[in-house]
Every structure is written in C-alpha cells, then in structure tokens.
Amino acid sequence: MKKMSIKRGYRLTKREIVILILLGAAILCFILVLLYYYVQVYSYYSRVLPNTYLGNYLISDVSFEDLESVISSFEDKVLDEKNTFRCNNKEYLYSYRELGVEIDKDKIIDSITNYQTALDWQELNRILDDNTRYTFHYFFVYDKEKIREFLNTLKSVVDVTRVDGHFSIGEDHSLQYVSGVNGYSLNIDSSLDSILSYLDGKNQKGFVELDGTIDQASSNESYQSIDTKVSSFTTKFNPYISRANNLRVGLDYIDGVIVPPGEVFSFYKYAGPYNKKGYVFYYEYVGNGVCQIATTVYNAALLGGLEIVKRSPHSAKSPYVPGGLDATVASSSNGWNIDFQFKNTYSYPIYISAYAVGGEAHVDFWSNKDALGGKTYSTESVQIGKRGYTTYLHTYQNGVWIRRDKIATTWYSKD
C-alpha cells in the first residue's frame, strides 16, 4: 500500500501580513469616513444647513421641529423692522407691524424644509463643502384693507398742494420771489399693489416705490432775478375824503404788474377804463383821483431811469408834485382814452408794488440789483413864466453826479 503525502499549506510572510493589515485598516477607515459623511449629510434632511439665514437671522443647524420656536424668538424684532417707502423724492420709514402685517411661520418652514428635502445626497454634500451662505426670505400674512387704511393715513402726510411761483410781500412791503412747489397726490390703488409685491417677495430692491401724481407748478425763473427796489415814489392825499377811494382802487389795479424787458407798460391797460369796478363818479369827472396814481407811477419810472413813451400833463398844476412832473389819464365810454406809458429798458423784469399807507400813495419798482448799472436818478422842476415848467433828470454814477438831461417843458392852461 502506497503512503499518501499531504502538501504543506502556504505560510504568509510577515511582510505580507503587515500589508494585509494595513489594507484592511485603510478599507475600514474608508468605510468609516463614508459612513460618517453619509450620517452627517443625511442628518440635514431633518435640520437646517450650515450658514443659512432667515432674513438677517442665522438659523443654521436648527432641527426642523424647532424651527417654529426659533422663528418666534425673533418674530417681534422682524415685525418692528423699519421698511423704506419712497414717494415724491422723500423717504418714509414704517414697520411691518404698522402695516398690520404678520409673519407666516408655516409657509417659511415649508419653504426651508421643502428646499432641503428635495436635494439629493450629492447636492447636499456639495453645499456642505462650499459652505456658501443661503438666505430664505420671509412670508407674510396681511389684510389688504388694513394696508389700504395705512396708505390713506400716509396720503394725508405725503400729499402736497401745488403752489405756483409767486411774490411774497413782507410787512415792510419788501418783495421776494418764491419758487413754485409741485403738487403731489399719492395713488392708493397702485401703491397698494407695490406694497403687496414687496411683501410677496417679488420686489428685491429693499424699498417700496409708491406711486403718485405730480401736479407741475408754474414758475418763471426770470422772476427770481427780481431782488432789489430800484426806484420808488410817494404822493400824499387826504384819506378821509371820498376821492381817496379811487386812489386806492387805482393802486390795487396796478399792484403786482410785471413788465418784462423791452415791454411797454400801459396804465390804461391795467387801471382803465376809469369807470370799471371799484371806481366811483365825483363831480363831472370819471374816476377822479386816478391821475394821482398815474403821476406817482410816472415819477417812479423817471427815478428808475426808464424811457417815457406817453405822458400828458393836466390843464393845471397838480398840488401833489412839483410843476411838470404830473401825468394825466382819462377815458370815455366810447373807448377814447389818455394813457400813460413807459418802456422797461432793463435787461430784467420789473415788478410794480403799489399800495396806500394812511394818506400816502406808494409805487415801488423792483428789479435786479444790476438793472441800474450803478446809476441813480433825481428830478428837478424849474418854473418858466407863470404857468410853465421845465423838468430835468439828474444822473449819478455810484453816487457821483454825471449829467443833467431835459425831460420836458410843460405849459398849463390855467391856474
């Protein structure tokens, strides 16, 4: 019988054993790392991702179950945050609470959880590796009618009544041009739509632009150049007699008249005819007394160095000015009239301020400080014979007399 031989088993060398141990350890570590990452990533299917914000508030690593309580912890702060509302080039700050708005916590939680649970494992892992910031926005619950009430209250604050450019007269009869102010009316319906769009997250500008209608004010920029009284003249009258009525009425008719550069001022155009509203008949004359106002304007024009276009004297010397410095006006029902006119020879408009103070009739000419070019004027009346007068205009440059010019020679037909 043959003997059977048993082959002896292969014995691993020490080096091979070490290699196998190291390889096994590496595989185990790899499995453990994979398991760790899987567990870590998988956990974010039930808690908020790192570096995640709700508005300005960090909510990272909060479990989905605790989200409601976390949001509630800063809910009051959110509702008290001020929002910017812009209209008519101004900004107004109001909180969500003032709009009657509340946070919709359920909708916020759904948006967070739905976003994360919809991510696959690789997407979650990529987000964790990037550690980029992600911000969720608020959802709000609101009542349109409460917001409409808010806008109606705001309307009473922001609406502006149009004010056209105008001249402001001080108590001392000083003059200042006030530029116009555009009117503004808040549009409730379209502004409501803008606020709702903001609350619904459709507006990401960070402010709400409210809608309104601008009512454009009229304004004349050239009037802003009127800043100086360039000439004035005053005549006296008895304020206690009936004639004084026509003087005051005549002053009212020319007060506020603006004469543009190069234009001719007609006294009749503004104050005539002299039987219109306000004037009364005295003796045989129509509008008796108005001539004194025309005379006052005439002298203000002379002292302003302006060109006299039409001037007619009375038949007799007037008691309220030196001889030859009067100007008469008259009108009849058929349209005939005697007018007084002067031309604005300045490069700036002239504003006529006419008013009575007690027994004085005042006419002030206002224009730009450079209108006279440093010149001032005075008048002189020289009597020639019994009823004749020659008038002269004296011109001064920066206070120094430079010339004397004849204005006119007037002959009165009666005393």
Image (cartoon, rainbow, N blue to C red):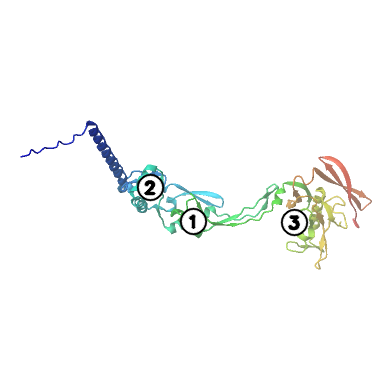
Looking at the image, tell me whether mark 2 or mark 3 is earlier in sequence order: 2
Image coords of residue 298 (percent x, y): 81, 53
Asked whether 189 or 36 is in front, the reply is 36
Marks 1 and 3, how far apart at CA = 51 Å
Image coords of residue 395 (percent x, y): 85, 44
For the N terminus, the image quarter is top left
Residue 59 shows up from this direction = no
Q: Secondary structure at mark 1?
A: helix
* Residue 287 falls in image quadrant: bottom right
Please tell me whether mark 1 or mark 3 is closer to you in this view: 1
Please tell me whether mark 2 or mark 1 is closer to you in this view: 1
Give the numbered dot on residue 63: none
Marks 2 and 1, how far apart at CA = 23 Å
Give the numbered dot on residue 254: 3
Asked whether 389 or 373 is in front, the reply is 373
Q: Which residue is mark 1?
A: 194
Residue at the outermost top position: 14
Image coords of residue 333 (percent x, y): 80, 67
The three-letter code of the residue at mark 3 reads: Ile
Q: How many marks?
A: 3
Looking at the image, tell me whether mark 2 or mark 1 is earlier in sequence order: 2
Tell me which residue sits at (81%, 44%) in the image: 376
Marks 2 and 3, how far apart at CA = 67 Å
Mark 1 crowd level (few <14, some 14–19, many ≥20, 10 Å Cα): some
Q: Which residue is mark 2?
A: 75
Q: Secondary structure at mark 3?
A: helix
Mark 2 crowd level (few <14, some 14–19, many ≥20, 10 Å Cα): some
Residue 208 shows up from this direction = yes
The three-letter code of the residue at mark 2 reads: Glu
